[in-house]
């Protein structure tokens, strides 16, 4: 029986400049390279779901992946939509916001350190308003089996979507990035919460230094989320793997990261993890476990071996 995943989130064009160092005020430097590409956490996670739901671009899939978002009436919008379609994503729910620019991320990468400096202009992503998501049909028709959300669209809109989905009995996966403190009622009955170390720290009012300390007990964090009503909690730990706990487990489980040949670019690794996990969720009817987290780690491992964001996300037979 066919399943549906709806991703509601951001679509951005990434403008990436590689530079020997960050210029000082008033200084002009010659950049090493410049590139553009499709991005946005919502779109990245949609690509991950679509690619990891089928062996390759020509194979059929029992999962329909639908992207719901907004682009501007400019030259960037059509290319983002076309890019998603090339990964076999249903883009019929993407709207064009007249008078708005498409979301843009201007990314400056310092070559010597790899440190990023990013200026994000949300543009049309912020045209998604809470009032548009008060009915079950606003989540897509047919009703999805899973809704995936991030925090690159207005927070009030995300909160309304969660409320509507819960009332309709639709499973929700929340990846609260970029992280901000959330109302406590968000967590009650939330099916899946995926956070990285810094996001976990912000949501639980801890310092990043505390959670990154050697030997930190992640059971304390996952148990806190479970006590608030989350059913499945995963903390992604980069090269250290992930930590997973569900409501039926006394203690959480540490999952090792996938061994990689060479780390080329970590962009979209977290989004790949979300997509791989989401595919497991809908295939198993919401019942997930350690093997599903291991599979998500493997998929993320393949992504970091390639340069780029969406272009680096693997198809299932590459994992």
Image (cartoon, helix red, strand yellow):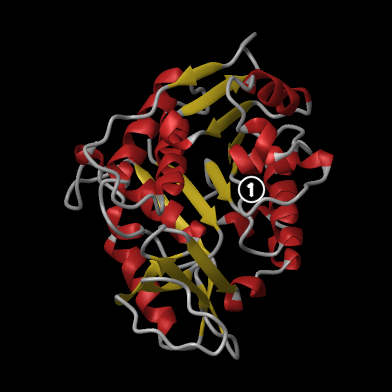
Q: Nearer the viewer, residue 84 or 245?
A: 245
Q: Which residue is mark 1?
A: 176
- Label 1 residue SS: loop
- The vertical placement of 306 against 80, above or below, is above
Q: Residue at x 74, y 64 (%)?
A: 130
Q: Nearer the viewer, residue 52 or 62?
A: 52
- Left or right: 213 as drawn, with respect to 307: right
Which quadrant is the C terminus positioned in? top left
Q: Residue furthest right?
A: 184
**Residue 108 locus on image (x, y percent):** 45, 71
Q: Is residue 169 visible?
A: no
- Left or right: 273 as drawn, with respect to 146: left
**Residue 120 locus on image (x, y percent):** 57, 72
Q: Is residue 26 visible?
A: yes
Q: Residue at x 59, y 45 (%)?
A: 175
Q: Residue at x 75, y 36 (%)?
A: 206
**Residue 258 locus on image (x, y percent):** 32, 30
Q: Residues within 10 Å of mark 1 (few under 14, many from 20)?
A: many
Which quadrant is the N terminus positioned in? top left
Q: Residue at x 34, y 84 (%)?
A: 30
Q: Residue furthest left?
A: 58
**Residue 50 locus on image (x, y percent):** 35, 50
- Left or right: 199 as drawn, with respect to 224: left
């Amino acid at each position: 029986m066919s399943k549906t995943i709806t991703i509601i989130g951001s679509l951005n064009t990434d403008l990436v400049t590689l530079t020997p160092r960050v210029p000082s005020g008033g200084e002009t430097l010659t950049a090493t390279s410049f590139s553009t590409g499709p991005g946005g956490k919502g779109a990245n996670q949609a690509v991950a779901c679509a690619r990891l739901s089928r062996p390759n671009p020509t194979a059929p899939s029992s999962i329909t992946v639908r992207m719901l978002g907004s682009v501007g009436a400019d030259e960037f919008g059509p290319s983002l939509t076309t890019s998603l379609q090339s990964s076999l994503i249903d883009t019929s729910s993407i709207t064009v916001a007249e008078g708005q620019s498409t979301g843009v991320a201007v990314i400056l990468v310092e070559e010597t350190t790899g440190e990023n400096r990013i200026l994000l202009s949300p543009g049309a992503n912020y045209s998604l308003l809470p009032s548009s998501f008060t009915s079950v049909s606003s989540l897509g028709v047919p009703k999805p089996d899973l809704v995936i959300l991030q925090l690159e669209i207005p927070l009030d809109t995300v909160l309304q979507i969660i409320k509507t989905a819960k009332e309709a009995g639709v499973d929700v996966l929340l990846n609260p990035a970029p992280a901000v403190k959330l109302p406590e009622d968000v967590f009650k009955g939330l099916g899946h919460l995926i956070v990285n170390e810094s996001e976990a720290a912000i949501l639980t009012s801890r310092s990043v230094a505390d959670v990154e300390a050697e030997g930190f007990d992640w059971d304390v964090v996952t148990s806190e989320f479970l006590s608030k009503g989350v059913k499945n909690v995963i903390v992604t730990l980069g090269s250290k793997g992930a930590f997973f706990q569900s409501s039926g487990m006394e203690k959480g489980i540490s999952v090792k990261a996938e061994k990689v040949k060479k780390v080329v670019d970590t962009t979209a690794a977290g989004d790949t993890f979300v997509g791989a996990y989401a595919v497991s969720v809908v295939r198993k009817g919401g019942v997930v476990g350690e093997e599903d987290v291991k599979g998500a780690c493997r998929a993320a491992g393949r992504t970091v071996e390639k340069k780029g964001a969406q272009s680096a996300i693997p198809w299932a037979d590459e994992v």
